[in-house]
Image (cartoon, helix red, strand yellow):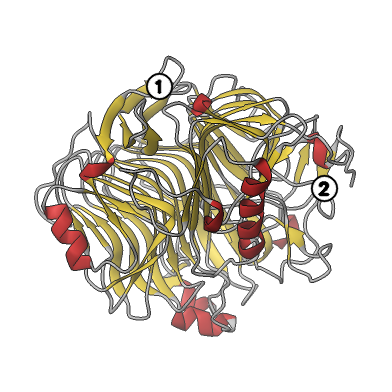
């Protein structure tokens, strides 16, 4: 393995025991690179200006007039506290007012840890410029800082709405060769403008090239991107100068400069010239008078490229006074009263205990979370209940199962009855994540249930925890952290761009609605069924990772993967990775199954495709198109 700036090679991990995640086989060509970043501590922020919203002690707002060492110290302090705090309760957001931060001689270098958001407060990403880098490195699980270093569990962090003028001054040859963003699921990059060097999605400097499993980028203008060991990635509505390689699922949707996919699976690219339905995530910004607002982008159709190329992203502006700014100490009754009065909802960073549903009933309501704001179910509640109404946007929120089983963690629309919706103004979920287990025992029948028509799911990770702090054995986890279904889609005309669903105990995804579309699907089957009898669907061995209802007549999936790693019982088998109606209108493009060293998936889809078993661990079984043309 080389750490030369001219070449980086990713090899499979020799030991999956530490975190129980996946093997990566990849090869990346590296080029000189640099990019910006850091994370901070609230104590360094200037006091809020008169009329500015009080966003709480865990939100820090930086001003370009602040000394660089002061900003750097705040960000470094929070990174030190959060770099290993995978299952903790601390949440942070660091917001940068318009201006320039860092200099040629004194670059600002931001390292982003767990539950940390870094965002600019400009109307355009070019309004905030970081001269330096914003990075995530491999996490080293051993005390010596050199062993068990990997990116497979670098979850839950956010970077958005700024420019990075990469400055590597003073760094060694390897670190100076790229801006590193070595992450996995539940991490988003949005509205970025990166110049000056390449962006590497793997860290080939810390203990050599290591595994990574991400990820998502949208609405960004990027230099050459080193994908490296990233097993799957979706980049949507962006512009890139080039892309290095593919591993299993690298999907490009509406990306200017995207590679061609004509020779799939060599390389493993899936390229759509345009994205059929998209809406960028709402963002905080300061207007010309220094007032806080939230910009809510409009939906786009059959689009490509960035939304801010010709000025302010099309959409509507909501002044911050129209939001109820909630704290974790606020009751659900208070939040619901504010929503009923017509307020939008801004969730400041923290963990909210939710014993009854937050009800979002009014059309065009925006619920925006900062710093990975987390809603935890109490007494079997459904933390978020979204009405059948057009234009509702839920963004930047994590929803956790609690100790008592919830029927569902987030519901959109009623399960029975008339389903309304607007094709021109879809209800949208952006960077909405789910957890069943991990930081504590969790129980849910279903994590995400979508019953409304015309819903857009723009990047979600729906996760039943394969590891955590509960101290369980695998068998104990199977019977204690219970989650039957990850995502159940009953509505028609639902589009998912970046659907990541893992480890649920029956179907991970069930798609019952007509005319649905998924662009990038990533799934791992559960690691922990104790016996084959525990993993049976009637007479069928196991549950497919992606199931389209038998009655469905029109459905499209572009770029999908189902992985198996039955580490609790390697003899367990699953009949199909994908199960769909055998009808011409249900089409799967570029799908695969892969074995991660334990267990077997007998076929890719509907009895088609070779087994993904231990004889070909780490080597996918691909189907270019189903049904075959």
Q: Nearer the viewer, residue 252 or 57?
A: 57
Is residue 442 depicted above or below 413 in this figure? below
Coordinates of residue 549 in the picture (x, y in percent)? 31, 51
Quick check: can you spot residue 465? Answer: yes
* Mark 1 surroundings: few (<14), some (14-19) or many (≥20) residues within 10 A: some
Q: Which residue is mark 2?
A: 205
Say whether residue 339 is left or right of residue 188.
left
Residue pointed to by mark 1: 303
Mark 2 crowd level (few <14, some 14–19, many ≥20, 10 Å Cα) = many
Q: Residue at x 57, y 36 (%)?
A: 65
Compared across the picture, whether 340 is left or right of 242 comes to: left
Q: Are marks 1 and 2 in contact (CB under 8 Å)?
A: no
Q: Is residue 473 left or right of residue 431?
A: right
Q: Quadrant of residue 509?
A: bottom left
Q: In the rendered image, which quarter is residue 177 located in?
A: top right
Total marks shown come to 2
- Tell which of 408 and 96 is nearer to you: 96
> Is 441 in front, or is 475?
441
Residue 139 placed where, x, y %?
Answer: 71, 59
Q: Which mark is residue 441?
A: none
Asked if residue 280 shows in the view, the reply is no
What percent of the width, then of the height, locates residue 499? Answer: 45, 47
Identify the mark nearer the N-term, 1 or 2: 2
Counting from the top left corner in percent of width and height, residue 44 is at: 56, 53
| Helix, strand or loop status at disc 1 | strand
- Say which residue appears at 49% left-offset and 69% top-offset: 89
C-alpha distance separating marks 1 and 2: 37 Å
Tell me the residue at 61%/69% (across/down): 566
């Amino acid at each position: 393995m080389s750490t030369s700036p001219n070449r980086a090679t990713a090899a499979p991990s020799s030991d999956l025991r530490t975190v129980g995640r996946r093997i990566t086989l990849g090869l990346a060509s590296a080029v000189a690179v640099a990019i910006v970043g850091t994370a901070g501590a609230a104590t360094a922020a200037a006091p809020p200006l008169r009329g500015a919203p009080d966003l709480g002690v865990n939100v820090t707002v930086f001003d370009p007039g602040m000394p660089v060492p002061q900003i750097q110290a705040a960000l470094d302090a929070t990174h030190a506290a959060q770099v290993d705090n995978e299952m903790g309760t601390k949440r942070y957001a660091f917001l940068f007012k318009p201006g320039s931060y860092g200099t040629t001689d004194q670059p600002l270098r931001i390292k982003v840890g767990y539950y940390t958001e870094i965002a600019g407060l400009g109307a355009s990403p070019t309004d905030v410029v970081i001269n330096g880098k914003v990075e995530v490195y491999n996490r080293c699980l051993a005390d010596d800082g050199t062993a068990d270093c990997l990116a497979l569990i670098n979850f839950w962090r956010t970077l958005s709405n700024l420019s990075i003028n990469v400055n590597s001054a003073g760094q060694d040859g390897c670190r100076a060769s790229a801006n590193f963003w070595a992450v996995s699921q539940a991490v988003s990059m949005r509205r970025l403008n990166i110049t000056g060097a390449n962006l590497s999605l793997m860290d080939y400097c810390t203990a050599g090239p290591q595994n990574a499993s991400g990820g998502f980028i949208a609405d960004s203008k990027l230099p050459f991107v080193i994908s490296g060991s990233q097993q799957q990635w979706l980049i949507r509505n962006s512009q890139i100068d080039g892309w290095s390689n593919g591993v299993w699922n690298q999907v490009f949707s509406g990306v200017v400069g995207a590679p061609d996919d004509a020779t799939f699976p060599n390389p493993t690219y899936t390229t759509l010239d345009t994205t059929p339905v998209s809406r960028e995530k709402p963002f905080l910004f300061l207007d010309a008078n220094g007032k806080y607002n939230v910009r809510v982008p409009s939906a786009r159709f059959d689009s490509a490229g960035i939304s801010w190329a010709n000025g302010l992203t099309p959409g509507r502006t909501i002044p911050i006074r129209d939001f109820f700014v909630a704290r974790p100490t606020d009751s659900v009754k208070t939040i619901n009263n504010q929503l009923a009065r017509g307020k939008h909802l801004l969730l400041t960073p923290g963990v909210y205990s939710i014993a009854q549903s937050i009800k979002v009933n009014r059309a065009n309501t925006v619920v925006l979370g900062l710093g990975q704001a987390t809603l935890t179910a109490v007494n079997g509640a459904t933390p978020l209940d979204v009405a059948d109404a057009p234009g509702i946007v839920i963004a930047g929120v994590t929803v956790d199962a609690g100790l008592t089983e919830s029927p569902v963690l987030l519901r959109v629309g009623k399960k029975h009855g008339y389903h309304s919706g607007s094709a021109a103004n879809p209800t949208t979920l952006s960077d909405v994540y789910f957890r069943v287990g991990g930081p504590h025992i969790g129980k849910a029948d279903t994590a995400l249930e979508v019953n409304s028509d015309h819903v857009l799911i723009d990047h979600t990770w729906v996760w039943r925890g394969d590891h955590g702090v509960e101290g369980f054995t695998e068998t104990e986890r199977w019977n204690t952290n219970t989650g039957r279904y990850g995502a159940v889609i009953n509505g028609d005309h639902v589009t998912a761009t970046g659907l990541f669903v893992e480890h649920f105990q029956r179907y991970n995804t069930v798609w019952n609605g007509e005319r649905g579309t998924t662009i990038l699907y990533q799934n791992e089957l559960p690691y922990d069924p104790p016996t084959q009898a525990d993993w049976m669907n009637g007479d069928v061995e196991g549950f497919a990772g992606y199931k389209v209802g038998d009655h469905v007549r029109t459905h499209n999936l572009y770029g999908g993967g189902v992985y198996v790693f039955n580490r609790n019982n390697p003899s367990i088998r699953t009949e199909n990775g994908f199960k769909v109606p055998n009808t011409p209108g249900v089409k799967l493009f570029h799908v695969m199954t892969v074995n991660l060293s334990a267990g077997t998936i007998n076929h890719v889809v509907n009895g088609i495709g070779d087994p993904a078993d231990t004889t070909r661990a780490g080597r996918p079984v691909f189907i270019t198109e189903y049904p075959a043309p």
